[in-house]
Image: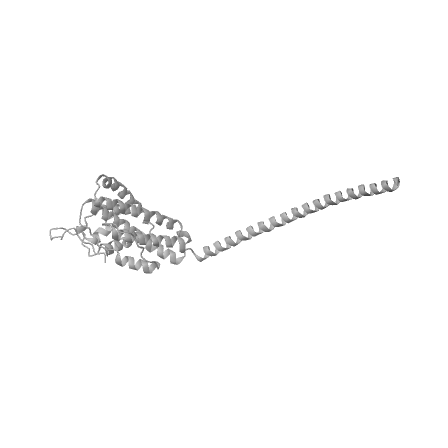
């Protein structure tokens, strides 16, 4: 179910963060993203990190108010700064963290392609893309939290089934199957979920055009075909006309030559008759 495992069993001396206060204390999306970058997960009082992030994204209307890319770009900036630290300290955890950042960047690039097409979406595609954007924001925050977990050498808060219920819902909603991916240590659940979101983005780009646009595309193809055949037809007639002119010319030449030959033959006959 995506239950978050704390680094250690929290004792009574650890002060828990009040969720309602936490949700309302930020004025901008950037401030919120930086809070997630600094947050101590073991101090958050929540049974399920995935559900908590989902509620928080909806509560702040990040997607509804068109701030999806503000949040994602801020996370990209934070992660870019962390990449320098990760490269300098090579170990299995930092290697997995670098791979995870790369996977997220790939997903964001594909998502930007879908973003550019959104003006052509029909109602169903708009609903799918809205849900997809929510997942994109959430996975970006989760990647940030995972990177910090690696850097701080904390116990992983995700298990193999962390994304399970979300993956099942997405597959049902987009009518796709979970892609089969290679095994990667430490970040396998992230790798599988990001691969699934990539499939969603590709489907949105390739298959979710409005019926009006599809009809326009068909009409455009028909117009191109008509122009093509008209050009062929015109070219054929022109060729046929030039061929007729050529044949007439050759016939005239041949006729002229034959006439000259007949004139010479008549002169020869007449001359022969006259001299005999």
Q: Is residue 113 visible?
A: yes
- Quadrant in the rendering for residue 209: bottom left
Percent position of residue 274, x then y: 88, 41
Q: Residue at x 53, y 52 (%)?
A: 225
Percent position of residue 21, x then y: 21, 52
Percent position of residue 273, x then y: 87, 42
Image quadrant occupied by the N terminus: bottom left
Image quadrant occupied by the C terminus: top right
Left or right of 105, for residue 245: right
User: From this viewpoint, which residue is outermost toward the front?
Assistant: 276
Q: Residue at x 39, y 58 (%)?
A: 123
Q: Is residue 61 visible?
A: no
* 107 and 184: which is toward the camera: 184
Q: Residue at x 27, y 46 (%)?
A: 99
* 273 and 249: which is toward the camera: 273
Left or right of 203, for residue 146: left
- Quadrant in the rendering for residue 249: top right
Left or right of 116, for residue 272: right
């Amino acid at each position: 179910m995506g239950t978050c495992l704390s680094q250690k069993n929290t004792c009574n001396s650890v002060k828990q963060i009040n969720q309602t206060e936490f949700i309302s204390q930020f004025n901008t999306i950037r401030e919120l993203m930086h809070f997630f970058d600094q947050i101590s997960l073991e101090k958050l009082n929540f049974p399920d990190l995935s559900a908590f992030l989902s509620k928080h994204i909806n509560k702040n209307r990040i997607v509804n108010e068109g701030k999806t890319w503000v949040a994602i770009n801020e996370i990209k900036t934070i992660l870019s700064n962390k990449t320098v630290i990760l490269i300098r300290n090579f170990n299995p955890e930092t290697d997995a963290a670098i791979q995870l950042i790369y996977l997220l960047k790939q997903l964001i690039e594909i998502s930007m392609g879908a973003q550019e097409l959104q003006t052509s979406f029909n109602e169903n595609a708009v609903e799918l893309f809205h849900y997809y954007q929510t997942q994109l924001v959430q996975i970006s925050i989760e990647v940030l939290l995972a990177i910090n977990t690696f850097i701080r050498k904390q116990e992983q808060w995700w298990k193999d089934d962390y994304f399970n219920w979300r993956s099942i819902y997405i597959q049902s909603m987009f009518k796709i199957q979970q892609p089969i991916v290679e095994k990667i240590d430490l970040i396998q659940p992230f790798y599988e979920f990001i691969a699934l979101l990539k499939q969603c983005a590709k489907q949105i780009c390739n298959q979710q055009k409005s019926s009006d646009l599809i009809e326009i595309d068909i009409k455009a193809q028909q117009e191109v075909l008509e122009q093509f055949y008209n050009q062929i037809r015109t070219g054929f007639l022109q060729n046929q006309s030039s061929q007729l002119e050529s044949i007439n010319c050759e016939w005239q030449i041949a006729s002229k030559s034959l006439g000259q030959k007949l004139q010479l033959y008549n002169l020869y006959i007449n001359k022969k008759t006259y001299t005999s």
